[in-house]
Amino acid sequence: MYWRPLQYVVRNVITASASRMALEQESCLVRTFIACRLVGASSPSPIQTQFRTIHRTLQRFNVKETHQAATEEEVGAFTKLIEAMGFTGTLKYNKWKIKIAALRMYTCCVERINYDEFFEKCSLPDTLNSWFLVAQLHVWMCLVRMKQEGREGKYMCRYIVHSMWEDVEQRSKIMGIDAIHRKESMRAMTENFYAAIFGYDEGILSEDRVLAAALWRNMFNRQCEDPRQVELMVEYVRKQMQFIDTLDGADLLLTGEVKWRPLMEENAQSILKVATPTYNDTGL
């Protein structure tokens, strides 16, 4: 007859002890967080770590490494609301012109690249997947460049990627790949593409060995035995990004014309100033 009251008392004691321990742990975590914030605020700007030197600064720089403060375009509350819902507000240029320019830019990534040279110099098999690995590298470089052009550039990036997936699907149909295997291949390529973007972004903002690791993982698929091939691709990406950064943003938004530097050249450090593209009043 005393078992149920005793069980009730023991349960209450255990519950109270657990609540007390949870409160103590929470207060300990809060104290630790406050202490870390205070230490972080009083620590010097460069923080030495085991792997990499981290510099903390409140000043923002763009990808071109100029010392001008990056200014963001001011948009109204309504524009922010509709863009948060997945729509696009009013842009500086006509949306159809930007879509056409995006298709042209993707076409430059496909038709102005000597894929046979990449296959030969990088020892890649002549397959659809190898073509996609080289194409996505150039598409990524275009995305990096256009994201510097504000909301218009981000809008253009969406249609560059859209054009790429449409082209990949059409090429797989022409090659006779059935629907089931085509769906599996598209899923694998999608995962590879977004993983490669993260790796390339880290590499272009870091030192050469980080970029080389990203190229080895994604483009070479971890199967490169000659380090000179990786070195060649690191040099190619660096000089290519430096080259397209010199192109005018307004011209890219209206024309989408991109010229690529060759894979093999004697003086890779030279930057040639390209001629300004001409277009009519409608941007075509």
Image (cartoon, helix red, strand yellow):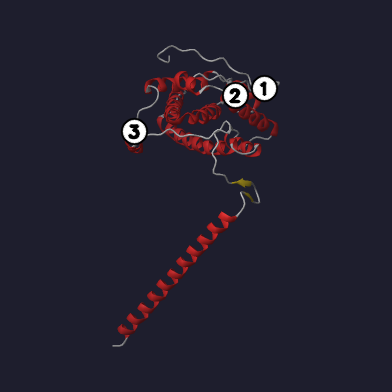
Q: Quadrant of the N terminus?
A: bottom left
Residue 195 at x, y percent in the picture: 51, 39
Rendered residue at 42%/31% (across/down): 151
Whole-number angstrom distance, CA of label 2 to CA of label 1? 9 Å
- 192 horizontally vs 75: left or right: right
Image location of residue 59, percent across then percent down: 55, 41
For mark 3, give the secondary structure.
loop
**Disc 1, SS:** loop
- Any mark on residue 243, and which? 2
Residue situated in front as seen by the camera: 43 or 206: 43
Q: Amino acid at mark 1?
A: Ser
Q: Around disc 3, counting alpha carbons within 10 Å, would you say few (fewer than 14), some (14 to 19), or many (20 or more)?
A: few
Q: Residue furthest bottom?
A: 1
User: What is the C-alpha distance between the residues marked 2 and 3?
Assistant: 33 Å
Q: Amino acid at mark 2?
A: Phe
Residue at label 3? 87
- Looking at the rendered image, the quarter that the C terminus falls into is top left
State the mark number for residue 228: none
Do the residues under discs 3 and 1 have CB atoms within 8 angstroms?
A: no
Quadrant of the image occupied by residue 281: top left
* Residue 80 against residue 246 in the figure, above or below: below
Residue at image coords 32%, 80%:
8
Residue 270 marker: 1
Pointers 2 and 1 in contact (C-beta within 8 Å): no
